[in-house]
Image (spheres, grey):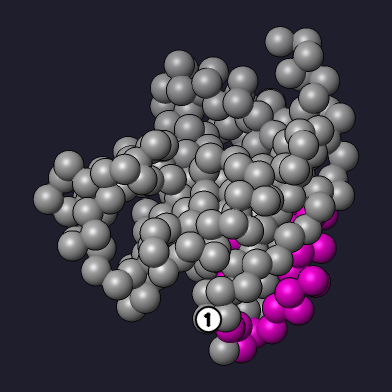
Amino acid sequence: MRRFAISDIHGCAKSFKALLKQIQLTNRDELYLLGDYIDRGPDSKGVLDLIFKLQNNNFKVKCLKGNHEDMLLKGLHDHEQRYMWKVNGGKIALESFGANEVIDIPSKYLDFLEGLDDYFDLDDYLLIHAGLDFNMPNPLDGKYSLLWKRGWYRDIDYEWLGDQIVIHGHTPISRKLIETDVQRLKERQVLNIDAGCFLSYAKDKGHLCAFEMNSKQLYFQNNVDDMNAYYGIIRSD
C-alpha cells in the first residue's frame, strides 16, 4: 500500500487527473489531499467531481480543508469574506459551477467542503494545509494557523513533534526547493509540497506535486490547464 499526499490543486482538474495517471493510483493506495481544491484554475467543480468519483469507486481518498475552502464557506454569511474569496480566484470557481454567487453552488459541494478535516495525524506523518502555532499547548488546536500560517519553521517544537514529519502546502515554492528539502527530511521533519500549480507563468513553478510517504519519492506534473481566464482577471483588476 502506497500513501500519497497532494496539495493546492486550485481548480486545475486536468493537471490533477494527469498526476493521478502518472502515479498510477489504485484503490489499494491511500491518497491524502491537503486542501485548496478550488479557485484560480478553470475547473474547481471538475476537481471536486474527480474526488467524488474516486471515492465512489472505492479509492481511499481523504481530504483536508484549505484556506480557500474556508473563505468560500465564510462567504456564505459574510460580505467581506465573500469579496475576499472572489478576488482570490473565486470568480473563476463560480464560473465552473455555472453560478453567480456562492449560495448558488449546489449543496453537495458545499456540504463536502463544510465536512473537511483540519489535519490528519498519522503515526509517522502529520498532514496539514498551512502551518502550526507552536506557541499553543497543542498546535493542532490552532485552526487559523492550520489554514493560513506561513513562516513558522523557526518555531518548530521538536520535542512536541517527536518523530513525525509535517507535510503541508499553502505557500507556493519552486520544484527545485521541494527536491532539495526532501533530501533533508530526517533533519528538518517538514516538507512543503505546494509547487505552485496555478503559477504556470512563473519560473520553476507551475507544477502539481505528489509525495509518496513510504518511499519518500516525489512526482511532478506540469500544469496542463488553460489559465488564461485567471490571468485575464488579474490583469484587469
Percent x, y of residue 196: 67, 43
The magenta stretch spans residue 1: no
Q: Is residue 180 left or right of residue 157?
A: right
- The residue labelled by disc 1 is 214
Q: Residue at x 52, y 21 (%)?
A: 84
Is residue 117 among what the camera can see?
no
Q: Residue at x 46, y 17 (%)?
A: 79
In front of the other: 150 or 1: 150
Q: Residue at x 56, y 74 (%)?
A: 216
Please determine whether, in this image, residue 185 is positioned above or below residue 70. Answer: below
Q: Residue at x 39, y 36 (%)?
A: 151
Q: Is residue 207 left or right of residue 36?
A: right
Is residue 230 among what the camera can see?
yes
Residue 148 lies in what quarter of the image? top left
Count of numbered badges drawn on the protein: 1
In front of the other: 17 or 46: 17
In the rendered view of the protein, which quadrant contains the C terminus?
top right
Please determine whether, in this image, residue 175 is positioned above or below residue 198. Answer: below
Q: Is residue 84 left or right of residue 78?
A: right
Residue 160 lies in what quarter of the image? bottom left
Percent x, y of residue 14: 82, 54
Q: Residue furthest top?
A: 237
Please determine whether, in this image, residue 113 is positioned above or below residue 85. Answer: below
Q: Secondary structure at mark 1?
A: loop
In front of the other: 75 or 29: 29
Q: Which stretch appears magenta?
A: 2-30
Percent x, y of residue 232: 82, 20
The kind of residue on which mark 1 rests is Asn
Please determine whether, in this image, residue 157 is positioned above or below residue 41. Answer: below
Q: Residues within 10 Å of mark 1 (few under 14, many from 20)?
A: few
